[in-house]
């Protein structure tokens, strides 16, 4: 039940897996499509995701997240990779109906509790090749999403370099690297899990407001 990160910002990549872009009817972007989630959305392993009354359709997005370990400002891919403190599991919870109706994503992605992160940060040296990472998302024990980092359109070092040319990444910042296909709704009473083998399982119950 602990929050393992307190990022100054959370930078997320949209549509980084072709199959996920396709399931929402979106074309693949030609360069990374990034957006921000507020740090106030962060909760830890075991804490509840609260469904807001403003939305009728809240969905899970299991993702591989990297925690930044060094200040990254206009860096190329190699120093970006070296600047990662570690990897953790994240869930980019999204009010899908509001994402569509608002035309931009701040409200849909920004509610309190909409960024579960955990259960721990595993250093890159303990994980080896980041392109070998996999992520799975289960709801009530049923597998809903499964993705491999090797299927990302924009690999992690490229994403970090790209972001660092826009905004300085600070130690503790969090980068969510996109969700694979299989997103779906959450309702009160569900338990959603994001697992990265070698990192752990992030488990959160879903509750009504
Ligand atoms: Mg996402």
Image: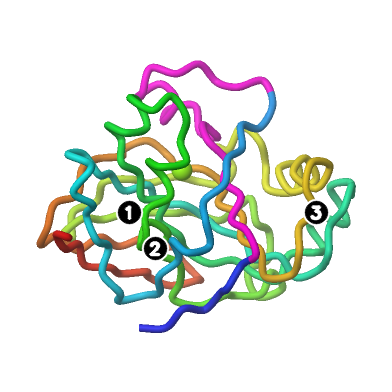
Tag 2 and tag 3, C-beta contact below 8 Å: no
Considering every residue shown, the one lying at the far left of the view is: 189
Expressed as whole percent of the image width and height from the top left, the position of residue 195 reads 39, 63
Rounded to the nearest angstrom, the CA distance separating label 1 from label 2 is: 6 Å
Q: Which residue is label 3 attached to? A: 168
Q: Which circle's residue, 2 or 3, is located before the other in the chain? A: 3
Q: Which mark is residue 65?
A: none
Q: How many marks?
A: 3
Q: Are marks 1 and 2 in contact (CB under 8 Å)?
A: yes
Magenta residues, as a range? 8-30
- Measured from the top left, where is residue 131 in percent x and y? 63, 50
Q: CA distance from mark 1 to mark 3?
A: 30 Å
Q: Does residue 28 belong to the magenta stretch?
A: yes
Residue placed most toward the observer, 52 or 168:
52
Q: Which residue is mark 2?
A: 195
Q: Quadrant of the C terminus?
A: bottom left
Q: Which mark is residue 137?
A: 1
* Picture quadrant of residue 56: top left
Q: Is residue 109 above or below residue 100?
A: below
Q: Tell whether label 3 touches label 1 (CB within 8 Å).
A: no
Determine whether, in the image, residue 181 is placed left or right of residue 82.
left
Q: Viewer-nearest of labels 1 and 3?
A: 3
Magenta span includes 13: yes
Q: Earlier in the sequence, mark 1 or mark 2?
A: 1
| Mark 2 secondary-structure assignment | strand
> Along the horizontal axis of the image, is 23 left or right of 56?
right
Q: Earlier in the sequence, mark 1 or mark 3?
A: 1
**Residue 87, image x, y percentages:** 59, 66
Secondary structure state at the residue bearing disc 3: loop
Is label 2's Cβ within 8 Å of ligand 1? no
């Amino acid at each position: 039940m602990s929050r393992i990160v307190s990022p100054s910002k959370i930078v997320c990549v949209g549509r980084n897996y072709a199959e996920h872009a396709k399931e929402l009817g979106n074309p693949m972007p030609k360069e990374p499509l990034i957006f921000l989630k507020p740090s106030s959305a962060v909760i830890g392993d075991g804490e509840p995701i609260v469904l807001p009354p403003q939305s009728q359709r809240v969905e899970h997005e299991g993702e591989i997240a990297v925690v930044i370990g060094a200040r990254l400002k206009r860096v190329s891919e190699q120093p970006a990779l070296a600047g990662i403190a570690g990897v953790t599991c994240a869930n980019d919870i999204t009010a899908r109906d509001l994402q569509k109706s608002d035309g931009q994503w701040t409200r849909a992605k920004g509610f309190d509790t909409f960024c579960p992160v955990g259960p721990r940060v595993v250093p890159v040296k303990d994980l080896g090749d980041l392109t070998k990472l996999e992520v799975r998302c289960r709801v009530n024990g049923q597998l809903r999403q499964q993705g491999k980092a090797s299927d990302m359109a924009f690999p992690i070092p490229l994403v970090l370099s790209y972001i660092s040319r826009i905004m300085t990444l600070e130690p503790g910042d969090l980068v969510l690297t996109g969700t694979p296909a299989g997103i779906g709704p959450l309702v009160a009473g569900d338990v959603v899990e994001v697992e990265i083998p070698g990192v752990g399982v992030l488990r959160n119950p879903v509750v009504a407001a």
